[in-house]
Image: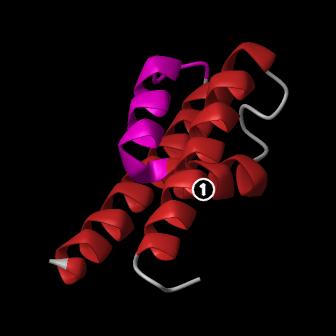
Amino acid sequence: MEKIAVYYFLFINFISFLSFYIDKQKAKNKSNRISEKTFLTYCIIGGSLGGFAAMQLFRHKTKKRSFLLPFYFIAVLHIGLIYGYARYHGSV
């Protein structure tokens, strides 16, 4: 079961990272964009690490406060959940 969780985590973070990259390219080309709701959905279902990495690497969505507040809330929530899981299972 833990192996499936790791594969899921890697997959959803890759998808999140990739979506930020694609949207950055679309922004440069003034093309149809990916909605912030889509980004936040990827993040809430586990892709916040990939989203954060892409934001830093591509300098995308790093100044838009209306996006950053829910994004960082989700990231902090995930950190708390991971810490709680690790503590409960004796890893911390």
The residue sitting at 31% across, 75% down in the picture is: 6
Image quadrant where residue 67 sits: top right
Query: Which residue is identified by label 1?
Result: 79
Which quarter of the rendering shows the C terminus?
Answer: bottom right
Q: Residue 7 magenta-drawn?
A: no
Q: Decide whether the magenta segment is chiefly helix, strand or loop.
A: helix
Which quarter of the rendering shows the N terminus?
Answer: bottom left
Query: Is residue 34 or residue 75 the one in the foreground?
Result: 75
Q: In the displayed structure, would residue 44 be above or below residue 13? A: above
What is the span of residues highlighted in magenta in the rendered image?
A: 30-47
Q: Residues within 10 Å of mark 1 (few under 14, many from 20)?
A: some
Q: Is residue 53 left or right of residue 82?
A: right
Q: In the displayed structure, would residue 72 be above or below residue 49? A: above
The residue sitting at 45% across, 19% down in the picture is: 37
Whole-percent x, y for residue 59 in the image: 79, 44
Q: Secondary structure at mark 1?
A: helix
Whole-percent x, y for residue 76 in the image: 65, 45
